[in-house]
Amino acid sequence: MSIRTDLIAEIKAESPDNITGLKTRDEQLNDITISTVCVTNDIAANAIKKPKGCYCTISFPRLDFICDTNDIINAIVKSLKSVCKKKIDSALVVGLGNTDITPDALGPFVADRILATRHISDGLKNSLGLQKLKSVCCLTPNVLGKTGIESYDLIKSAVNTVKPDIVIAVDALAAREAERLCRTIQIGDSGITAGSGVNNARKTLNCKNLGVPVIAVGVPTVIDGNSFFETQENMMVTPKEIDLLIEKASDIISRAINIFLQPEIDINIIESLT
């Protein structure tokens, strides 16, 4: 029985330890663990069925039990810096998903809280004392069933128009283990295929297709029903507290992305403008 997963941590745990081209390291930040896996050649990519690239997996206790989220935010910022290989002056943040389905609403909720600055003129930046504000824009392409347009086509058009240095794509993921749900954040530089976790894969968002580096940020919010019982139905299971968990995860991730994109601007100023 095949249980779908988007998480490299779960795939690696079931793979042989001696795969050539697979480099790993772990580090601890108080209660937070950052596990980095670098897939450096085609042998490793074929073995674990993941594209070549660098993947950071941030693991933490249950979000609904955590009051102080600063360690998680710092871990996300650290991981974004780890996978981003270039200087950034402009970025496009894409929130993938569907706000009508709570487990799939993470991406749009995060994009809603990112400080968009591309429209701010240099004159206004100077008058506000924000000369170092970088150019950021956001897009929530929604889903094909609601717009009639593939998310990829909207994102590609936006990239061609705004010409960002990078794209940061945020999406909900599928896990294999229930213990991973809303307790893991995966960040990688190999792009993302929206809908793959629920057997509805669309065209991949990556550097090859979009022409700019793509950093994927995801949180597992669902698990295949076959993990719990055999069924012929196409069932996905999500935590009963999913509304609270999505709200908290989107707040944490958006804050981390704002800090990563605007490192010289105080986060309190950023949040006062969003």
Image (spheres, grey):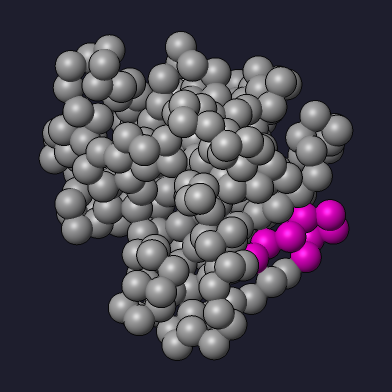
> Which sits in the foreground, 20 or 119?
20
On the question of residue 93 being in view, the answer is no
Percent coordinates x, y for residue 141 in the rendering: 29, 24
Q: Is residue 238 magenta?
A: no
Q: Which image quadrant for residue 91?
A: top left
Q: Which image quadrant for residue 156?
A: top left
| Residue 2 in the image: above or below residue 244 | below
On the question of residue 82 being in view, the answer is yes
Q: Residue at left 48%, top 73%?
A: 38
Q: Residue at left 65%, top 47%?
A: 177
Percent coordinates x, y for residue 178 in the rendering: 69, 42
Q: Which image quadrant for residue 153?
A: top left
The region drawn magenta spans 28-35
Q: Is residue 157 left or right of residue 188?
A: left
Q: Is residue 31 magenta?
A: yes
| Residue 144 in the image: above or below residue 27 | above
Percent coordinates x, y for residue 124 in the rendering: 38, 25
Q: Is residue 42 left or right of residue 162?
A: right
Q: Main secondary structure of the magenta part?
A: strand
Q: Is residue 203 left or right of residue 107?
A: left
> Which sits in the foreground, 154 or 241?
241
Q: Residue at left 70%, top 53%?
A: 59
